[in-house]
Image (cartoon, rainbow, N blue to C red):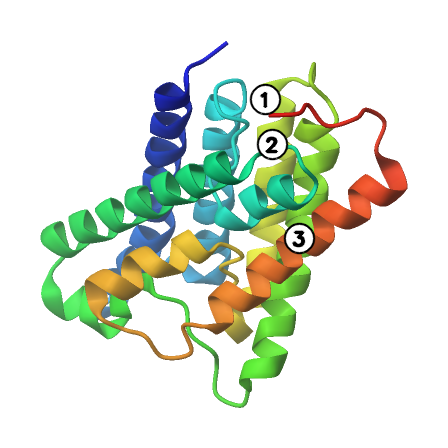
Amino acid sequence: MYSRPQKLAAELFGTFAIVLISAGAICADQFLKTTNRSSLGPLGIALAYGSAFGVFVAATVRISGGHLNPAVTIGYWVTRRLNSFDMLTYCGAQLAGACAAAYLLRGVIPEDTWRAVALGTPDLASGIARSPGMLIEGVLTMLLVFVVFATTADQPDASPAVAGMVTGLLIAAAALFGGPFTGGAMNPARVLGPALAARHWTNHGVYWVGPLAGGAAGAAIYSSLFLRRRPVKN
């Protein structure tokens, strides 16, 4: 068994890596565009996000459960797999990791590059109102948490590599769909870090309400319909 500090360190480090790579890919795409080179494009950005998430889920799932996302942690909490104190400390570690990654990006990427994309902070596309944006983020996060529960929460002996591959593919696919409309964040930590470092708060609430509600819904749906083992009481 891992101690609570070890679990929190895993959540912090894993979320740090995800935000560094996913937001960094958006900045890299912008840099390539301004230097007249082939950009990553939506597919490259989605693959960077999905790959980073999948790899670090695989790396941390045996330590902390591989949440790396407050929406996943909320799902564990509403289904009583995590007590309130652990839920708050997990979320705190995730947000701290996200903010550290964003400030690192701000420090190493040219200012004109990161300012052009608000350091990779997601925002709603033109023509997408807040309610549809929340719905898109909520539904995509619901699917993510459903998959997380199916591959990790209800499969204690599942291979970390398989869990990482499946969740990473889902993130990449969902980001391809959601990216043009909302940025396809599905993770409040992924949004808070860059938003804080870039001071870009436009439509910020969308990326909390939608994913947290979606995470709770995905967890509740899986638990009520497909749960094969009772949650471990904390």
In the foreground, 120 or 29? 120
Which residue lies under the disc numbered 2?
165
Pinpoint residue 96: horizontal percent, then vertical percent.
29, 44
Secondary structure beneath label 3? helix
Quick one: label 2 or label 3, which is nearer the N terminus? 2
| Whether residue 46 is situated above or below residue 156 in the rendered picture | below
Q: Quadrant of the C terminus?
A: top right
**Residue at position x 34%, y 35% in the image:** 12
Residue 161 is tagged as 1
Q: Is residue 221 left or right of residue 140?
A: right
**Residue at position x 34%, y 27% in the image:** 9
Which residue lies under the disc numbered 3?
216
| Amino acid at pointer 2 | Met
**Residue at position x 11%, y 60% in the image:** 110
Q: Measure the alpha-carbon separation of dots 2 and 1.
A: 6 Å
> For the residues carrying marks 3 and 1, which lies nearer the camera in this image?
3
User: Image quarter for residue 225?
Assistant: top right
Outermost residue to the right: 225
| Amino acid at pointer 1 | Ala
In contact (CB < 8 Å): disc 2 and disc 1: yes
In contact (CB < 8 Å): disc 3 and disc 1: no
In contact (CB < 8 Å): disc 2 and disc 3: no
Q: Is residue 233 visible?
A: yes
In the foreground, 91 or 107? 91
> For the residues carrying marks 2 and 3, which lies nearer the camera in this image?
3
User: Image quarter for residue 56?
Assistant: top left
Q: Residues within 10 Å of mark 3 (few under 14, many from 20)?
A: many
